[in-house]
């Protein structure tokens, strides 16, 4: 990490051409450096004498050469995003203008910010903890309403506040246990074991809830993977094209047209679903098609939701075997939805056959949806079933949902350590062993919020931010 005492600058808006661009400075010399290149429209105005949270119109230039007319916003320490003096220059969005202003600022004492340095300074200056800082990156990268809401809730401290509160209580207990060790010869007990057990039970419930939420959080952040599987010509590619509202996959009456996996993401009521069109499952001697079928089975194992498509008009469809084959490949956390396609062409006899046979296999099937992918019939019912697989109430109620893999791993380690503390309390182990397990809990919780960190960990986290943030 470079010196946090420097004044840094960067373009904080998206790269490329735009109507407006914002260039940000942060550091003790931000206003001073800006004064060297900024000429206010009102003569005699001095930026350093202006109040915080004010905007000033003028021009930026190098000597007698004007570069652009700009608006300059001033934020003074400690009441700013980074906790330092911040100046934001809003200029016209031509890349040439942006680069000219950056060159002026660096020539007058600023240096270019590294990736994520503004947010890193906010963390180092106590404006946010580490989990909140990481939520900033998640908010910037959010691709759906659900991802935005979860990231915003975490950025406001919803996740870390609960952990910090429990960690503080645990610190009080370990302090008392450490005090007991100092008086070990007198056999005194300062830490109430019953109260400690109550706290540990509460922590176990919270940590279990948080770790369990990761499957939902990871799906919200990266898109819920949905594998569309079934026999050849069941209408899988047609359904994918219908959902995406574009001809993404080739549709043909020829069996085995789809030989590879085709993926794309769509947003349904604020939730991202990553649909995967797979090769049709059938017995074939075609080596390339068989490779595609192997990938189909691989995608089934990795999907959160599997849509098994069956052709209502295909007399050769073995309904029982098809459902059993897919069910046997799923675990308890995966959802199976049977989609009966081509209902617009179905005769009464074929419908009756499906109705009789399909209900025999209801066990382990989360829903059965009859549709016509080609005629767009009952697609709304299918999307409704997809949404039912997501715990929307947790999102609507702003519950804490873990989306970060680093947090998830630290929470699992914390939970393991908490369970050891619980076992130790039940068995009555000595205070020194109990204190060691509690220290591990504090360590792993501290890794999440940043109360325990190293420069290497911080550098690895903030390097994944965009420049200017």
Image: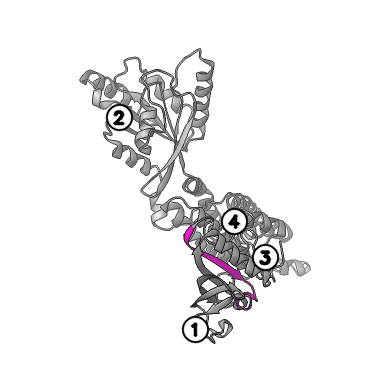
Q: Is residue 24 magenta?
A: yes
Which region is colored magenta?
A: 18-32
The tag on residue 42 is 1
Residue under circle 3?
174
Q: Earlier in the sequence, mark 4 or mark 3?
A: 3
Q: Main secondary structure of the magenta part?
A: strand
Residue under circle 4?
465
Q: Is residue 158 above or below residue 88?
A: above
Q: Foreground mark, 2 or 1?
A: 1
The quadrant the N terminus occupies is bottom right
**Residue for point 70% across, 60% down:** 435
Q: Is residue 250 magenta?
A: no
Residue under circle 2?
374
Q: Earlier in the sequence, mark 2 or mark 1?
A: 1
Farthest residue to the top: give it: 285
SS for callout 1: loop
Between residues 246 and 39, which one lies in front from this camera angle?
A: 39
* Residue 451 image position (x, y, % from top left): 65, 64
């Amino acid at each position: 990490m470079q010196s946090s005492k420097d004044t840094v600058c960067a373009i904080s808006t998206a790269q490329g051409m735009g109507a407006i661009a914002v260039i940000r400075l942060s550091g003790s010399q931000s206003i001073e450096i800006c004064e060297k290149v900024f000429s206010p429209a009102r003569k005699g105005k001095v930026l350093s004498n202006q109040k915080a949270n004010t905007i000033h119109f003028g021009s930026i230039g190098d000597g007698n050469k004007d570069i652009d007319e700009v608006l300059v916003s001033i934020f003074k320490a400690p009441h700013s995003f980074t906790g330092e003096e911040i100046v934001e220059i809003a200029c016209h969005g031509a890349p040439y203008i942006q680069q000219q202003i950056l060159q002026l600022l660096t020539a007058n004492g600023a240096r270019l910010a590294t990736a994520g340095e503004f947010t890193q300074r906010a963390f180092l200056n106590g404006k946010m903890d580490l989990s909140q800082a990481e939520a900033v990156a998640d908010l910037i990268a959010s691709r759906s309403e659900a991802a935005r809401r979860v990231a915003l809730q975490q950025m406001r401290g919803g996740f870390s506040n609960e952990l910090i509160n429990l960690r503080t209580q645990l610190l009080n207990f370990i302090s008392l246990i450490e005090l007991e060790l100092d008086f070990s010869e007198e056999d005194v007990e300062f830490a109430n074991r019953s109260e400690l057990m109550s706290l540990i039970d509460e922590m176990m419930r919270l940590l279990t809830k948080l770790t369990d939420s990761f499957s939902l959080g990871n799906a919200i952040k990266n898109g819920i993977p949905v594998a569309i599987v079934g026999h050849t010509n069941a209408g899988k590619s047609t359904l994918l094209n219908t959902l995406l509202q574009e001809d993404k996959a080739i549709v043909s009456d020829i069996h085995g047209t789809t030989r590879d996996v085709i993926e794309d993401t769509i947003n349904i009521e604020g939730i991202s679903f990553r649909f995967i069109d797979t090769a049709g499952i059938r017995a074939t001697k075609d080596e390339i098609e068989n490779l595609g079928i192997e990938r189909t089975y691989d995608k089934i194992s990795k999907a959160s939701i599997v849509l098994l498509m069956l052709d209502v008009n295909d007399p050769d469809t073995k309904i029982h075997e098809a459902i059993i084959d897919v069910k046997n490949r799923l675990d308890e956390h995966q959802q199976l939805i049977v989609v009966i396609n081509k209902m617009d062409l179905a005769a009464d006899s074929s419908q009756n056959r499906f109705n009789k046979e399909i209900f025999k296999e209801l066990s382990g099937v989360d829903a059965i949806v009859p549709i016509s992918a080609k005629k767009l019939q009952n697609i709304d019912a299918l999307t409704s079933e997809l949404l039912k697989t997501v715990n929307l109430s947790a999102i609507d109620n702003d519950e804490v949902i873990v989306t970060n893999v680093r947090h998830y791993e630290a929470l699992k380690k914390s939970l393991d350590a908490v369970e050891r503390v619980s076992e130790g309390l039940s068995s009555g182990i000595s205070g020194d062993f109990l204190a060691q397990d509690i220290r591990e809990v504090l360590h792993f919780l501290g890794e999440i919020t940043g109360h325990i960190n190293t420069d290497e960990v911080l550098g690895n986290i903030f390097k994944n931010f965009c420049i200017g943030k």
